[in-house]
Image: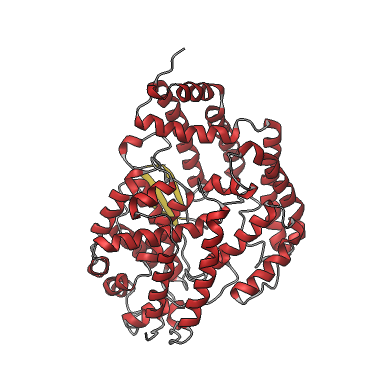
Amino acid sequence: MAKTEADFLALVKQISLLDMNLSLMGWDARTYLPKDGASFRGELTAYIGAKEMALTTGPEMGAFIAYFTAHPEALDAKGQQVLRLVKREYDLNHDIPADDYAAYQRTVSDAQQVWETAREAQDFTVLQPYIEKIVAYQKQFIPYWQNGQATPYDVLLDQYEPGMTVAQLDPIMETLKAGIKHIRAVIATGTEPRVDFMSRAVPEDVQERVVRATVERLGYDFNKGDLSRSIHPFTVPLNRNDARITNRYGVHDFQMSLLGGIHEAGHGLYMQNFDPDFDYTPLSNAPSMGLHESQSLFNEIFIGRNPAFWQGAYGRFQAATGDIFTDIDEPTFYQGFMATKPTLIRTEADPLTYPLHIIVRYELEKALFNGETTVAELPALWRQKYQEYLGITPANDTEGILQDIHWPGGDFGYFPTYLLGQIYAAQFYHKMSQTLPVADILASGDYAPITEWRRENIFRLGASVTPQELVQRVTGEPLNPQYWLDWMTQTFKTAYQVQD
């Protein structure tokens, strides 16, 4: 029986509506859900998640995919793009034995609980058996996920960054390692910034007002969003008219809250500006995790850490914070804001040293899934690489290999997207700078031309293009880490007053 595009898109809309429900419940669970409501919420989330999975990988979707694959002329251009994305999701999951996948999900759930126990004990061996099970399950599933990739780890990378491979990433990682080492040597010849004022007490309500005003100026629309508080900042992917962000605040860490809010607003901006024609389809998303991250990092690093931004924003910041920073001039403030030093904890790293944290995890994950190491060897390798790349060694597993929840959550292949986001953002920023007077715009405080450039070139396209197509379309060339290195070199030379 012939299938219609309208019926196909109606099924896709059902999936989208269920996904919005899951996102809304996730936001509520991490913001306002009463503690005792967690068990009921867990059941509700599992129920709706199962309904969504049944539609995503069920026989009705399979029939649509088979028909339209054989009859591509029955879909218009938008329908073809939707088919590409739903087929990808269908192919990932529908062949895996249901009992094995359920057992894997239980293992992941258990591992995340045990991770907290292991952190308290500062002992990776408590978690090790669970990570071994997760890795074993994923190695079992990789043949089902395989789609012509060269190595097992390529299969995992592709789930988060479609088309990305070890062959592409290895030279990028080597370029960055060498480049970061060079930049750190260069700024060592400069002047160490004054940083004592960076821990001055700023009331949380003042911080929140600053964040709200800043992200609104950057283009985040509060008629289509919201700013709440949570333990860990995150963005809720509901739809283009409801893209909520959260943030956290620390009285003695205003930089964390400001950059965190700016970061999440980048995600929110992306979602608020998808093409309305993409509503209720997977096209209303970024092409990849790395590209979604690129827009939050564009905000956080290439705007929020830009000297021109602070030339325009510092007066407003001083006015908002009263007499707290009246004795600190703008150049001194910016230099302290940009201070860099190696840290053991990834989430506390500055943008210059942050890639090294990702490179450690990438190299360990790649070795683990390509058969070059074992789970038991990971803690020692972790310590060795931190000493080699950052010059510091964790004193225990909690400030080392146990610091992230990604591996207990089964998210192998995810970490590189954080680094790819920085590289994408740098390349986009470079291209934008060729057509817009970016420094003048940032110094002026009216960022509308920057927001419009991003909307036209990136946001509105959503997932209608692949990651590779988007980068080529926007910048005219493939992904290139040199733009990141060039920007970091110049910016940190400015902050450390290095003379050419």
Can residue 371 be seen at all in this image of the molecule?
Answer: yes
Q: Is residue 83 above or below residue 465?
A: above
> In the visual, does 332 lie left or right of 392?
left
Q: Quadrant of residue 54?
A: top right
What residue sits 72% from the left and 64% below the top? 379
Q: In this view, does 396 lie above or below 267?
A: below
The front one of 90 and 272 is 90
Q: In this view, does 126 lie above or below 283?
A: below
The front one of 278 and 484 is 484
The front one of 181 and 203 is 181
Counting the numbered discs, the total is 0
Residue 121 at x, y percent in the picture: 74, 63
Can residue 264 be seen at all in this image of the molecule?
Answer: no
Q: Which colour scheme is used?
A: secondary structure
> In the visual, does 51 lie left or right of 500?
right
Residue 7 at x, y percent in the picture: 41, 21
Q: In which quarter of the image is residue 117?
A: bottom right
Residue 52 at x, y percent in the picture: 53, 31
> In the visual, does 135 lie left or right of 432?
right
What residue sits 37% from the left and 85% below the top? 500
